[in-house]
Amino acid sequence: MVFAGCANGSIMAIDCRDNLQYEITEPHGSSEDAAVLAIRHSSTGGASLLVYATADHRLVIANLETETEAVIHMADPASPGQHRTVVAMDVTVSGRYLVVCTTHRQVDIIDLRDPERAVYSSETALRTHTRSVCWLDESSFAVGSHDGRVALMHTGRDQKTFAFRAHRSVTPAGQSIAAPVGALAAHPNGLWFASGGGDGVVHTWDPVQKRAIARIPEGGVTLPDGVTGLSVNPAGDRLVVVTADPATGESSVQIQAV
């Protein structure tokens, strides 16, 4: 089953086996405010949960079995009474923990079995707004920023954050150009993770040795458009890469062996 969030706030479910699709939630509010910005599915504690964030500052945790939902508004610590917008999120392999990146470089971790309060909250070590996030294991995650940097963060207070330049290039004139890190995805066992940039390049990284492993495509060529989505199959040997033309919004999908 594949879930897709729509610009009007509705959620579509797509059954790949029968090639059927149907709406599981109705549109919410105006199209501009209700757009679904991020969506994830989780199976934890015997429950099938669909978690999605909308442009009107809602973080919705919907139980697909009981057809109930909880709505969370992420408070802005810098502006009392205001709420933050979720820009990216990911669920651990166990399905229990949700990491949420919001405006103002804030990161929160929510236990989906008890989502009323965050079990971890911190600012990232990145200089600009966050664009993407993925879990590496149950206690470590990677965050990508607008200026091409990636930070490896840990929930343990004794482990230091490591940040590095992932998607930056230098022109023949010596000018450094940064590309947003539009997507992150990790191997199911955390052996490596991939970053996709607005520069049309995907890099794979070793999170332990903190070094680059491979570049997709190889050589000096790039993909036709910037990378907006990444996903790793359960076996960890295939990487789905989504690119989008910023002018037309048209997307393309390709599968890479890793």
Image: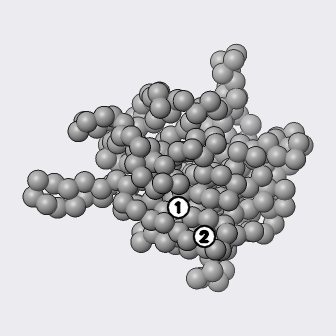
Q: What's the residue type where badge 1 is placed?
A: Leu
Density class for disc 2 (Cα within 10 Å; few <14, some 14-19, many ≥20) is: few
Query: As rendered, which of 248 and 241 lies closer to the eye?
Result: 241
Q: Residues within 10 Å of mark 1 (few under 14, many from 20)?
A: many
The first of marks 2 and 1 along the sequence is 1
**Residue drawn at x 45%, y 48% as measured from the top left:** 205
Q: Quadrant of residue 47?
A: top right
Residue picked out by circle 1: 152
Instruction: Specify whether 14 is left or right of 115.
Output: left
Q: Which mark is residue 125?
A: none
The relative height of residue 71 versus residue 257 in the rendered view (above or below) is: below
Give the CA separation, mark 2 to mark 1.
10 Å
Quarter-wise, where is residue 196 in the image?
Answer: top left
Left or right, 99 with respect to 247, comes to right
Q: Is residue 187 above or below residue 28?
A: above
Marking on residue 159: 2
Residue placed farthest to the top in the image? 18
The residue at the point 46 percent across, 56 percent down is 210
Q: Does residue 197 show up?
A: yes
Q: Position of residue 106 (x, y in %)?
A: 57, 70
Q: Give amino acid for label 2.
A: Gln
| Residue positioned 35% across, 48% down in the render | 198
Instruction: Pick out the residue farthest to the left.
Output: 173
Q: Quadrant of the N terminus?
A: top right
Label 2 secondary element = loop
- For this orientation, the residue located farthest to the front is 209
In this rendering, the count of numbered labels is: 2
Coordinates of residue 228 in the picture (x, y in percent): 45, 44
Frontmost of labels 2 and 1 is 2
The spot of residue 166 in percent (x, y) is 38, 55
SS assignment at label 1: strand
